[in-house]
Image: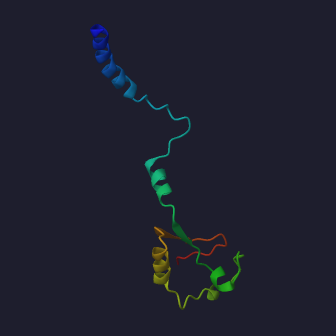
Amino acid sequence: MEKRYSYFLIFLPISLVLSCSKPAPPPPIQPVPSERQLAWQEMEFYAFVHFNMNTFTNMEWGLGAETPESFNPTELDCKQWARVCKENGLKGIILTAKHHDGFCLWP
């Protein structure tokens, strides 16, 4: 009986150690995202601002034929935009600088 007990005391810790080891994870099947791609996924809540001719012509899609004089942001308050975004938990703002209709927000 004592011999059995000795075997039990010897093999119990060994079996516990062996059963606790983790198997290696399987190799990835598809491409693994890069660090930059993972960081992009962390930016879940951003604002996209499309400030263009359509803001002043009340059209959803511009055709590119609007006169440049129509773009007249006299009461523009970008700080208000940033404040609202920050108050609502957005992490950043992305401004669309060039639009499909050819309008650009640079000279």
**Is 15 or 94 nearer to us in this picture?**
15
Tell me how the rendering is colored.
rainbow
Can you see residue 21? no
Q: Quadrant of residue 56?
A: bottom right
Q: Residue furthest front?
A: 1
* Vertical arrangement, residue 94 with respect to residue 5, above or below: below
Q: Residue at x 47, y 70 (%)?
A: 89
7 sits to left or right of 98: left
* Vertical arrangement, residue 42 with respect to residue 88, above or below: above
**Is 68 or 78 nearer to us in this picture?**
78
Q: Residue at x 58, y 89 (%)?
A: 72
Can you see residue 59? yes
Q: Quadrant of residue 6?
A: top left
Residue 30 drawn at (x, y percent)? 56, 38
Residue 106 drawn at (x, y percent)? 52, 76
> Which quadrant of the rendered structure holds the N terminus?
top left
Q: Residue at x 58, y 75 (%)?
A: 104
55 sits to left or right of 33: right
**Is 75 or 43 nearer to us in this picture?**
43
* Vertical arrangement, residue 12 with respect to residue 104, above or below: above
